[in-house]
Amino acid sequence: MRNIKLTIEYDGTDYHGWQRQPRSATVQETIEKALARVLQEKVNLIGASRTDAGVHARGQAANLKTKSRIPLKNLKAALNSLLLEDIVIKSCLRAMDDFHARYGAKGKFYRYTILNRALSSPFVRKYAYFFPHPLDTQAMKKAAKHLVGRHDFSSFRGTGTMRKNCIRTVKKLTVTSRNNFIYIDMEANGFLYNMARTVAGTLLEVGRGKISPQDIKKILQAKDRRRAGPTLPAHGLCLVRVKY
């Protein structure tokens, strides 16, 4: 029995997220069907991050266990020949027997992209959130610094979630502006449901002048989702890589 690690890139536009769901197309199920055809056995593909509907990935990690002895380069080629153009297997490697893509992850790096100019662009409409009004990126940078570190992120989790432990460690959170694009890069040991998109929405409100950078501390302390900014649309978010 081999344990195989896949690194996957996908456009999440036409998928109802990563995780397998009844009556909805998901990335996990789509790849599992291709795996079953190639390996001639049913497999369970374990993803590092359960990306939401519409979220993209450049470096999603996943693992599966199989009895098949097919060479890994052949497995990679076969999968890519079966998958649609919006999913690509970037690498296919032999992993240690105890490797688990989700539980073994030490950190995840997400990027939220905002197109900040007067006119939208048809070329990036699926991959960047369009915001036509001026944003104070310096204020956004100051606010981001208050979110770095180990905090209770209850104010930034999706409504309706029942997770009791909302403490996460944000290792890096930067805001950069280049050629009308604003990039919000987030690295943490883990993310709550909708956390990355809510952090991005809160920083956007800071850029608009609706929230001051100093208010971020109060929002964290409140542990109240109503105090933070909106959850920005999924299409602006991308899972860049997973660290092990």
Image (tube, grey):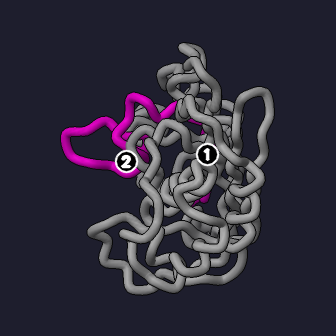
Which residue in the structure is indicated by mark 1? Answer: 112
Boundaries of the magenta span: 1-28
Q: Quadrant of residue 7?
A: top right
Residue farthest to the top? 122
Q: Residue at x 59, y 78 (%)?
A: 168
Q: Amino acid at mark 2?
A: Lys
Residue 212's place in the image compared with 87, above or below, is below
Q: Is residue 208 magenta?
A: no
The quadrant in which the C terminus is found is: bottom right
Q: Residue at x 43, y 47 (%)?
A: 18
What crowding class fits label 1: few (fewer than 14 Cα within 10 Å), some (14-19), or many (20 or more)? many
Q: Quadrant of residue 9?
A: top right
Image spot of residue 46 (x, y percent): 48, 57
Q: Residue at x 49, y 36 (%)?
A: 235
Give the camera-side residue of 39 and 34: 34
Which residue in the structure is indicated by mark 2? Answer: 42
Give the camera-side residue of 124 and 132: 132
Secondary structure state at the residue bearing disc 2: loop
Residue 205 visible (yes or no): yes
Residue farthest to the left? 23
What crowding class fits label 2: few (fewer than 14 Cα within 10 Å), some (14-19), or many (20 or more)? few
Image spot of residue 78 (x, y percent): 57, 26
Q: CA distance from mark 1 to mark 2?
A: 35 Å
- Of tags 1 and 2, the one toward the viewer is 1
Mark earlier in primary sequence (1, 2): 2
